[in-house]
Image (cartoon, rainbow, N blue to C red):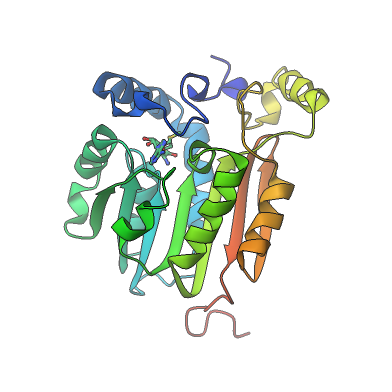
Amino acid sequence: MDANHQHHGHAAAHGHADDHRWSDERFVADWIQRQEAHTAERRPLFAKVRALFPKGPTEAFRYADLGAGAGHLDELILDRFAGAQAVLVDGSQPMLEHAQQRLARFDGRAQYVQADLSDPGWVERVQGPFDAVVAARAVHHVGSADRVREFFDETLGILAPGGLFINLDYVQLAGPAFQQLGTWVGGDPDAGFQIASPHMELPSTVEEQLVWLREAGFAAAECVYREFQTVIVAAIRDEIRWPEGAMSS
Ligand SMILES: C[S@@+](CC[C@H](N)C(=O)[O-])C[C@H]1O[C@@H](n2cnc3c(N)ncnc32)[C@H](O)[C@@H]1O
């Protein structure tokens, strides 16, 4: 597959809150194998998510990864932040088992919670509050646009004061012309665009998400990175609490 035009197999499983394929061990093992073949594209995006954590290298904090999958992002975060405690939330038991194996070396710093993020009941299961919440290519799985709005309300509710929500995901493009343009730029591999499969059904645009995050009560929300359908959005609960001395000149 053209590295500049790959979609990490998401066309096979996206956007349906009732998607049962994630519970299938074989499907999950194949999916993880496909992701690992694309580590070169995935890792820089995960590193961007990690770079947004306003935390010191040994500072104690607790975060949740919603739709954590096999824990690839968490491996990077736990490696960098020695004081981090992770709660990995996913609807798929096979995914959580893969994550548990991957993160075994972080003995005791990761917990695993099976929960369906399309149902507001997930909030009770994760035992917040958290200093940060991350989600990587998971929010588009929680359901319709209305469900995404509710999900943002729920996410705000599990953040501690000073908390940050970081959402790496796929969003709708403004129209078919941009889908075609997305296909077109794949013809220049040197450009290295991170392009999602342009035909994915997705619940919202990034502009809608930014409005919904502010309506949910986040003090501020910004799209801090974008390449066609791939975005990273950061939403601040009230204000960022920087590590001591980090912002002094
Ligand atoms: C595209 S994968 C992303 C996994 C991981 N965050 C990554 O970037 O490698 C989506 C993940 O969301 C999970 N998922 C899908 N629908 C879900 C739901 N309704 N509730 C909880 N998890 C769900 C899947 O099991 C899968 O692990």
* Residue 48 relative to residue 160: left or right: right
Q: Pick the residue in front: 143 or 110.
A: 143
* Quadrant of the snapshot with the C terminus: bottom right
Which of the two residues, 193 or 148, is positioned nearer the viewer here?
148
Q: Is residue 2 left or right of residue 19?
A: right
Compared to residue 175, the image places residue 208 above or below, namely: below
Residue depicted at 38% across the width and 58% down the height:
123
- Is residue 52 visible in the rendered image? The answer is no
Image quadrant in which you'd find residue 77: bottom left
Q: Position of residue 74 (x, y in %)?
A: 36, 50
| Residue at screen point 66% across, 40% down | 204
Can residue 108 be seen here? The reply is yes
Left or right: residue 14 versus residue 99 is right
Q: Is residue 215 above or below residue 99?
A: below
Image position of 113 with respect to 163: above or below: above
> Quick check: 24 above or below 76?
above
- Total of numbered circles in the picture? 0
Q: Which x, y percent locates residue 53?
A: 49, 64
Give the x, y percent position of residue 111.
24, 55
